Image (spheres, rainbow, N blue to C red):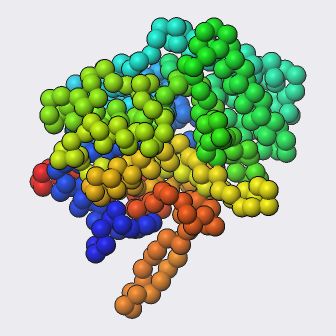
Amino acid sequence: MSITPLHQCSLSLDHQSLISLLAKTENILIIQDLDGVCMGLVKDPLTRAIAPEYLEAVKSFTGHFYVLTNGEHIGTRGINRIIEKAFDEPNIVRQKGLYLSGLAAGGVQWQDCYGNVSHLGVSEAELTFLEQVPHKITAYLEELFEQENYGLDPKQIKKCIAATVLDNKVSPTANLNVFHEALSESSNGYLELQRKMQSLMEQLLEEAHQKGLEDAFFVHYAPNLGRDLDGREIVQLAQGKDSGTTDFQFMLRGAIKEVGVLVILNRYYYQKTGSYPLGEEFNARQAPQKHEQLLDMIKTHFDPAIMPKMVGVGDTVTSKAQEIDGKIQFKRGGSDRGFLQLIQEIGQEFQTGNIVVYVDSSDGEVKNRKPLKLEKLIENQQEVWRVRSGPGDSQDQEDPLTLNVVFPGGYQEYTSCFQIAASKRKDEV
């Protein structure tokens, strides 16, 4: 086990120390992403699977574990249906409270462990507009492929469109994974599809503006290259085998993961004290967007004596070098970067030693993540492994986000450690 505290480590493989920390720390708060973290990344969301043993392990952390995802709990492609399929008797999920508590749709869809869902701060007008978005994406794709089929036959196009359009209630999405595979023989087909999908998203934002919902929505691109000067996420166009941005999510303004951290923390304090530091009705749509302002809210309203040690777990962090005006600049993004960095910053501010955990999901079906690179060394006449480089650009030496503990073996390795920690926690806490 490591002598150096985990929060001071970078790219550590010391999983035993993490297990010990999870098992023995009473005042702990785990905030975890889903896809690629506790289940594999797949091209078709309908084929996702989650292990029942992992779901049972989560129960050992009741009140100390919450998910934070850009996907959704409910609907045909929601995590709840995947959880129900993991058991022979789906009714047992609700009876035993095995649904995953926490926030979905970037932070506006709350669920408890019994599957009770609420949409925090969302209006009926917004829900009505969102309901139409999947139909518009479908119609757009059908018309697009009628004009140019890129060598695909009608049956294949129909199947791909069905897998692409995710009819999520508050975060309708176009997931281009299946088209990336189908258009692998077309050098420009997939790249053109990315650009056209971005254009459609901008068109939908304009339609919302015309209906009086000008500040209601934004588009989340996953993975992305961070944000531009206006705060809009930057699309990562495909390069070679790297599919770049595959998910084009039409989301509610304010539904970003870092704000979700505040929502979860607000509820965690209520469990501990019986009162909400930010009020019972506080939701992601009421919060500021910038880290400095979020930290100020926490410093102002949250009692340091109750602040838990936080562990953030994610798999989507990017960093790419780009030459702009003759100078190298780094575009840092990834849908988990914001919330992981905020958790890190909270730990620094409150001196709680918060931990950032990274799960390498590059071995999944979706090829848009840079794998961790490992090397073997000899120390004290023994072979040991260490991580030579992380998921970001190797030239980026000033990335503010430190990945303390990493799992090169992907979600299987992470969930195995999590389950061991859960078993030990029953005896320790």
**Residue positioned 37% across, 25% down in the render:** 283
Whether 265 is drawn above or below 312: the answer is above
Q: Is residue 89 visible?
A: no
Whether 198 is drawn above or below 427: the answer is above
Q: Which image quarter is the N terminus in?
A: bottom left
**Residue positioned 42% across, 47% down in the render:** 342
What is the x, y in percent for residue 384? 42, 80
Does 211 sit left or right of 288 as displayed? right
* Image quarter of residue 167: top right
**Residue positioned 36% across, 18% down in the render:** 118
Does 242 sit left or right of 26 as displayed? right
* Image quarter of residue 298: top left
What is the x, y in percent for residue 264? 32, 35
- Which of the pair 323/199 is nearer the observer? 323
- Which of the pair 209/43 is nearer the observer? 209
What is the x, y in percent for residue 41? 53, 44
What is the x, y in percent for residue 176? 67, 35
* Image quarter of residue 291: top left
Furthest residue to the bottom?
A: 381
Does 148 sit left or right of 9 as displayed? right
**Residue positioned 47% across, 8% down in the render:** 124
Q: Is residue 330 visible?
A: yes
| Callout count | 0
